[in-house]
Image (tube, rainbow, N blue to C red):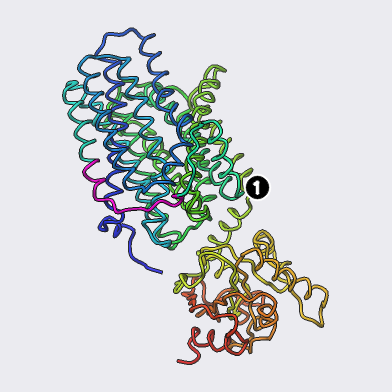
Amino acid sequence: MSDSSQFRLLGTRRFAPFFATQSLGAFNDNAFRNALVVLVGYHMGLDDDAVGFYSNIAPALFILPFFLFSASAGQLAEKREKAQIIRWVKLFEIAVMLLAAVGFWLKSIPLLLGVLFLMGLHSTVFGPIKYAILPQALRTEELVGGNALVETGTSLAVLLGMVAGGAAMSHSPLLASLLVVGVALIGWFSSRAIPAAPATAPDLVFNWNPLTETWRVLGFVAKDRTIFNSVLGISWFWFFGGVFTMQLPNYTKLFLGGNEGVQILVLALFSLGVGAGSLLCERLSGHKVEIGLVPLGSIGITLFGLDLYFARPAAASLHDLGALAFLAAPGSWRIIADFVLVGLFAGFYIVPLFALVQSRAERSELSRVIAGNNIINALFIVGAAAFGMGLAAAGLTIPQIFLAVAVLNAVVAIYIYTLVPEFLMRFLTWILINTLYRVDARGLDNVPEHGPALIVCNHVSFVDALIVGGCVRRPIRFVMYYKIFRIPVLSFIFRTAKAIPIAGHKEDPALLERAFEAIDAALQEGHVVCVFPEGGLTSDGSMAPFRPGVERMLARRPVPVVPCALRGLWGSVFSRRDSLLGRARLPRRFRAHIELVVGAPVAPADASAARLEAAVRELRGDLA
């Protein structure tokens, strides 16, 4: 696996033009919307009721196309070449921004609201392509880094767009018009450099009925339980973020005592936190889709969301503070830290979920899965608005609303991790392995991306399965000695991962036969199964001969066999030499540097126990 930084992608043609195009699109969306807010709120002489009416109807008009056209956009992204669609979308954006310029000049609210609807349509069509094109342009180990850069670029573009759009309109409608039209033109030019991304379902028969197609794309989302719950997790993020951002203007004014500059500062800090968390995902996950970060993200969002209530539960005594005056006020740095850390952990939460959906969904269905995700996101955003307004109508203050949504976030997280324990299992694995060891994994691309495969590995410690399972990108069914299922924590992890218990023939012949049946069934269903053919942990650090059980598995179900070797584990925590589980003394090699080396697959016809043992010994270094 490459250790190169995700920032290297910014120098490649297969990613950089797309990154620039999508960031410019996010910038222009928010520049236009904030320019419209400033125009309506400050330059047209409208009364407060009229301003409130237009402020409420504007978000609804922008989000309406997501309900109406997401399903059709998903079909289009599957059926046609994606780079060409992006260029069409950017030409559409130029035309819409020219209409916006006319609306700014005429100060025509109906025309500008129509433009807002069309920009929502622009985002609706671009949405499925935005995430479906990444698996085609990037290698698997680059997927987390690519998503992290996209989320970071989007967060910063949203912030800069809001600031630039508001500032330009405050100067003059002409400057705002030049800004949005100019950015749209630059976005079109950058889109021309995006490499071709072939259609993933060119023979798809286009369904023009948005209602039936919406139901169909939701079916694609619901087909895989992990994908469906990942989409629910993504949509919940939009709900949580929607509640916070919708309350932010009044929270800044009433509880922080700040002016518009403080609102921009807080939004900037949150956006920088999201960007930092997103970028850290690649390093923390080791270049792979690590869903163990998702529970970590939800824990951090909950804790620092709760602290926002305790940091400032009462209205501010000072008012109309600028950004510098707010920074100097007592208690401000705690609030700043909360917003930054909520954003940071939001990055840990959202990036792995998007990468998981991209890696698990079928390529020919991914755009429609993303379209379904966008529809559900839109529903949750509407729900966030209703939630905030309902709690406000019930008399709750804004900090109390933050408290309520933070508590609800914990409840939803527990519910999701109960439905899909794989998230929590991966989290515990990630914490355990990264606390006890420093792992260098090589050759992971030798594990097939799809279809059944058998992994064989030497057996050094009680956590070998956690290390292999934590490094390999695909879910693995491990064949484990049945007594390991009695170890606290490890028992939960292995049972959640659907490990297969096994015993020796003399111990429990019935359990042994059930294990072989379960192994065959797992391979038949297309899973990866990992066995430790030595039949037990090493007691002296050397490898024992491989037992012939692996040959029996392959005789019944011929599948590719991937040899793996664990190196550096002997003498570390949980090995028999130095473990509390083996001898009553403290471990001497905490945070040991260990390696997992994966070799090339061996054809089932050549995969004798002796041949596989020799391959693992070579990877382990015994033959050096």
Image location of residue 452, percent across then percent down = 60, 68
- Residue at the image position 52 percent from the left and 36 percent from the top: 306
Q: Quadrant of residue 216?
A: top right
The range drawn in magenta is 188-202
Q: Using residue 545 as the reference point, say whether residue 182 is left or right of it.
A: left
Residue 241 among those drawn in magenta = no
Image location of residue 581, percent across then percent down = 67, 74
Q: Quadrant of residue 24?
A: top left
Q: Which residue is mark 1?
A: 419
Residue type for callout 1:
Leu
Q: Residue furthest bottom?
A: 623
Image location of residue 546, percent across then percent down = 64, 86
Q: Is residue 52 above or below residue 305?
A: above
Q: Is residue 298 above or below residue 317?
A: below
Image location of residue 66, percent across then percent down = 45, 32
Image quarter hosting the C terminus: bottom left
The front one of 529 and 412 is 529
Secondary structure mostly taken by the magenta-highlighted segment of the chain: loop
- Residue at the image position 77 percent from the left and 80 percent from the top: 504
Residue 195 among those drawn in magenta = yes
Image quarter hosting the N terminus: bottom left
Q: Quadrant of residue 607?
A: bottom right
Instruction: Tell me the crowding category of disc 1: few under 14, some 14 to 19, or many 20 or more residues within 10 angstroms, Cα based.
Output: few
- Residue at the image position 46 percent from the left and 50 percent from the top: 201
Q: Using residue 48 as the reference point, say whether residue 238 is left or right of it.
A: right
Residue 578 appears in the picture as rendered: no
SS type, badge 1: helix
The front one of 186 and 404 is 186
Residue 218 appears in the picture as rendered: yes
